[in-house]
Amino acid sequence: MSSLLSQTDLFDRVSLGNLELANRVAMAPLTRSRVGSDGVPGALHATYYAQRASAGLIISEATNISLQARGYAYTPGIWTDEQVAGWRRVTDAVHEAGGKIVCQLWHVGRFSHVSLQPDNQAPVAPSMIQAEGHTFTENGFERVSVPRALTTEEVAGLSAQYRHAAQCAKRAGFDGVEVHSANSYLLDQFIRDSTNKRTDRYGGSIENRTRLTCEIVEAVLQVWDSGNVGIRLSPTTPDAGNTPMDSQVMATYGYLIDKLNDYGLAWLHFVEGATAGSRDLPEGVDLDALRQRFKGAYIGNNGYDLALALQRRAAGLVDVVAFGRPFIANPDLVERFKHNAALEVATRDDYYGGGAKGYTDWPRLIPN
């Protein structure tokens, strides 16, 4: 690894669409559940993100585009003026520290609980199919609720929610946005034939099932230049309730990527394998072949350590590498990588909820 480390361009400046990054190391979106029920980030969050601003790019924790989009308690939003002001505090701190940060726009769809929804209504989904698993509510972990299927008119209206959130992200000072169309959340629920049993223009054929993701991208591009917009996909992850994959992964996501090329997006962010799980792929699935169809930059994510990042970058298989869990305990992860230094390791108790402990109190290799 030492020879690869001495020769790598992982720590060199790089352009990502309109963004000029200090290096090819990205901080992946990390849900930390440390925001109040109003979804407004505060001073603690500004400190947290600024501590990690040496990453070439920070992708914010998944951020709810509306009250309907919520699926986990204590996660941030980007649809109210108060949330915009809170995120402005974060983006200002990141920029003052020399970093770049984009907002990941999130709607969980069916993976929610009635207590998290407006007026305790059922979560929404492409079809009335209940997800497996439990979600984190203000009463602890509870079984996800049975969703209701969106009407055709409601599906078409989702673009307005995303457009408004994209406008709020711009007002909040973000450098761009990433459309979260992964991990079996709402947009991915529409893409997969395992969760989409619709018979209208949003269901059935691959073209119909990918239609909503394309409409959302178009809505976001009414607010942001394409050079400031990326998208996240996870063709093989079963997370968010062990959702089965699409029955034709290569055909479905290949078609979608070809369509996305029409929009000139700055990056494609792939979960390689199963989110926070194995990088192994099912027989017949080749994610490298899929990502090579994309004409913009490629961000690889899932289970990367320094050795794998150096290897795949040297082989030209990735433009930027997104690290998640290592950034939790190592705010100076880029510096530690440069020196091949030991990493701190967070326990799962540090991941979610609480305050500064396990969030902003991690030691640095070289103290400030």
Image (cartoon, rainbow, N blue to C red):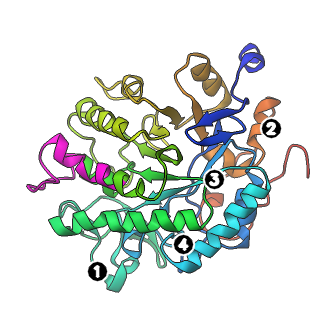
The outermost residue toward the top is 3
Kind of residue indicated by mark 2: Glu
Q: Nearer the viewer, mark 3 or mark 1?
A: 3
| Residue for badge 2 | 335
Q: Is residue 366 in view from this perspective? A: yes
| Residue for badge 3 | 101
Residue at 79% across, 30% down: 338
Q: Is residue 64 in view from this perspective? A: no
**Mark 4 nearby-residue class (10 Å; few <14, some 14–19, many ≥20):** many
N-terminal of the two: label 4 or label 3? Answer: 4
Kind of residue indicated by mark 1: Gln
Secondary structure at numbered mark 1: loop
Reply yes or no: does residue 214 show up in magenta.
yes
Front one among 228 and 314? 228
| Residue 200 left/right relative to 301 | left
Q: CA distance from mark 4 to mark 3?
A: 21 Å
N-terminal of the two: label 3 or label 1? Answer: 3
N-terminal of the two: label 2 or label 1? Answer: 1
Of the numbered discs in the image, which one, if any, rests on residue 121?
Answer: 1
Of the numbered discs in the image, which one, if any, rests on residue 74?
Answer: 4
Q: Give the quarter of the figure containing the N terminus.
A: top right
Highlighted range, magenta: 192-216
Secondary structure at numbered mark 2: helix
Q: CA distance from mark 2 to mark 4?
A: 31 Å
N-terminal of the two: label 4 or label 1? Answer: 4
**Image height of 114 relative to 71, above or below:** below
Secondary structure at numbered mark 4: loop
